[in-house]
Image (cartoon, rainbow, N blue to C red):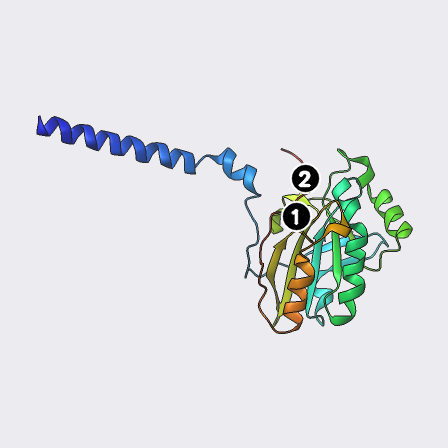
Amino acid sequence: MKIRLWVSLILCVGLTKSLNAGALEDPEERTSLRPQASYQIGDAVAGFRLKNTNGSMVSLADYANVKGVVVVFTSNHCPFAKAYEDRIIALNNKFSSQGFPVVAINPSDPGTHPDDSFDKMKERALAKNYSYPYLVDDSQQVAKAFGVSRMPQVFVIQKSGAKFVVRYIGMIDDNPQDAGGVTKLYVEEAVSNLLGGKPVVTTVTKPVGCAIKWKNQ
């Protein structure tokens, strides 16, 4: 009886571990959470070089003399991006002169969303008089490297020696639809703390917005 009981226990434990391992290793679950490559707080960002709406090429290396960059992944078509547009402009107006300019990147596939074509991006940048670069991520490789899940999504990166280090990831503030109802200014607080030599208090928030339609998937 004792031998049978021990064998049954061993089989149950083995089955439980196998089931748990299967749940953890579910590739569909992993890919639905975020792209395989994604930056976390404290990671150094790899350089990138993308085309701006004015026709020039803009790279992260161009920002060697700043204190940091507010990288915003956004688009033309997304209602959430439109709701945040004036707030993104305001962030650049406030912090660019203090060494934390905005860089906007559009990773959206124009094949799925025609409003996100390069010509439409140029029209939007001119109409709203963007004072910051609006870059097209045709291959979506930059968005994948950052681990973008929604638009708009912000990465506040701080210059540290020759590197740019991620200090904040997530929402611009806590009210995607109503700028007048905002109670927490996540990006503004993060940048202000960094400029004041203080650590960022809220480092990660869950972005709310439009999902990216990844190419070739």
Q: Are there few (<14), some (14-19), or many (20+) residues within 10 Å of tag 2?
A: some
- The answer to whether 143 is drawn above or below residue 92 in the figure is above
- Left or right: residue 101 versus residue 8 is right
- Element under disc 2: loop
Residue 60 appears in which quarter of the rendering? bottom right
Query: Could you tell me which residue is drawn at 61 percent across and 54 percent down?
Result: 169
Q: As rendered, which of 137 and 174 lies closer to the eye?
A: 174
Image coordinates of residue 38 in percent, x first then y, are 57, 50
For the image, the number of numbered tags is: 2
Instruction: Tell me the quadrant of the picture where the C terminus can be found.
Output: top right
The disc placed on residue 97 is: none
Q: Is residue 84 visible?
A: yes
Which amino acid type corresponds to the residue marked 1 in the rendered image?
Ala
Residue 109 appears in which quarter of the rendering? top right
Circles 1 and 2 in contact, beta carbons < 8 Å:
yes
The disc placed on residue 143 is: 1
Q: Is residue 45 visible?
A: no
Q: As rendered, which of 55 and 32 lies closer to the eye?
A: 32
- Left or right: residue 200 versus residue 182 is left
Query: Could you tell me which residue is drawn at 35 percent across and 32 percent down?
Result: 19
- The answer to whether 81 is drawn above or below residue 217 in the figure is below
Q: Which residue is mark 2?
A: 212
Query: Could you tell me which residue is drawn at 67 percent across and 67 percent down?
Result: 192
Q: As rendered, which of 130 and 2 lies closer to the eye?
A: 2
What residue occupies the far right of the structure in this picture? 127
Q: As rendered, which of 41 and 52 lies closer to the eye?
A: 41
Whichever of labels 1 and 2 marks the residue nearer the N terminus, that label is 1
In this rendering, the label closer to the viewer, 1 or 2? 2
Image coordinates of residue 146 in percent, x first then y, are 62, 51
Q: Are there few (<14), some (14-19), or many (20+) residues within 10 Å of tag 1?
A: many
